[in-house]
Amino acid sequence: MSVIASVEQLEALYGTPGEASTVKEIDWISLEYRRLIEASPFAVLATVGPEGLDCSPRGDRPGFVRIADERTLLLPDRRGNNRVDSLRNIVRDPRCALLFMIPGAGTTLRVNGRAQLSIDSQLLASFAVGEKAPRSVMVFTVETIFFQCARAIVRSDLWNPATHVAVETLPTPGQILSALSEAKVGGERYDQEWPERARLSLW
């Protein structure tokens, strides 16, 4: 198998990026990038730790990632499964990245930087939904930010309902858990109880 073993080989194969591919990268949140962040209800968070890499979905109402200033983002940690893989990584290695997506739009936004976790009581309270505040807030310092071209979204036809997979053809979480635990965890009851469990624990 032939593999690329150096940056020089890689650059020889792909050539030099065009001006539009480089001028879009800045180290602060411009007005245009602010508008993309504020419109996004979903982002993918990438982190790194001693065990390796992690990539985790984050979603809430549009604008759920708050812009504190032109170089700082605030992301509340909403309720989940308590694995805290991403948070464990951030505590040990602050390097992280966010990929913002906007339903219906081809453009995505990539943000690279460093983060720390805050448990300041006033900050937590400012992110409360109803009476439920997050247990921590990620304070993300922007190092680079730029939009990604729409080709991947166009190729995947991601937002087209006609191409969406019929969910009944996929294994359910309960089925997956049951198969992996020799039926000790999960099962049909798990799937039946999930909608109500989710409703009571979204925030």
Image (spheres, rainbow, N blue to C red):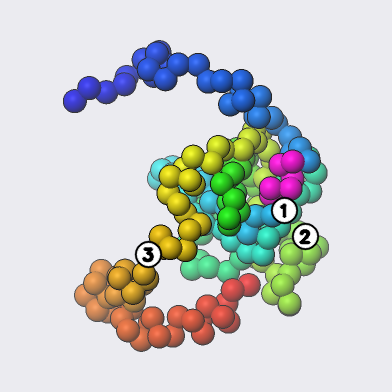
Badge 1 local density, few (<14 within 10 Å), some, or many (20+)?
A: some
Q: Secondary structure at mark 2?
A: helix
The circle drawn on residue 38 is 1
Mark 1 vs mark 3, foreground winner is 3
Name the residue: 65% across, 55% down. 40
| Residue 39 picture quarter | bottom right
Q: State left or right for residue 159 relative to residue 41.
A: left
Q: Which residue is mark 3?
A: 165
Alpha-carbon span between mark 3 and mark 2: 40 Å
**Which one is in front, 154 or 112?**
154
Q: State left or right for residue 117 relative to residue 10.
A: right
Alpha-carbon span between mark 1 and mark 2: 19 Å
Q: Amino acid at mark 2?
A: Leu
Q: Amino acid at mark 3?
A: Val
Residue 35 lies within the magenta run? yes
Q: Quadrant of the N terminus?
A: top left
Q: Which residue is mark 2?
A: 123
Mark 1 vs mark 2, foreground winner is 1
Q: Position of residue 95 (x, y in %)?
A: 57, 39
The tag earlier along the polypeptide, 3 or 2, is 2
Alpha-carbon span between mark 1 and mark 3: 29 Å
Q: Amino acid at mark 1?
A: Glu
Q: State left or right for residue 118 relative to residue 179.
A: right
Q: Which residues are magenta?
A: 32-37
Say whether residue 122 is visible: yes
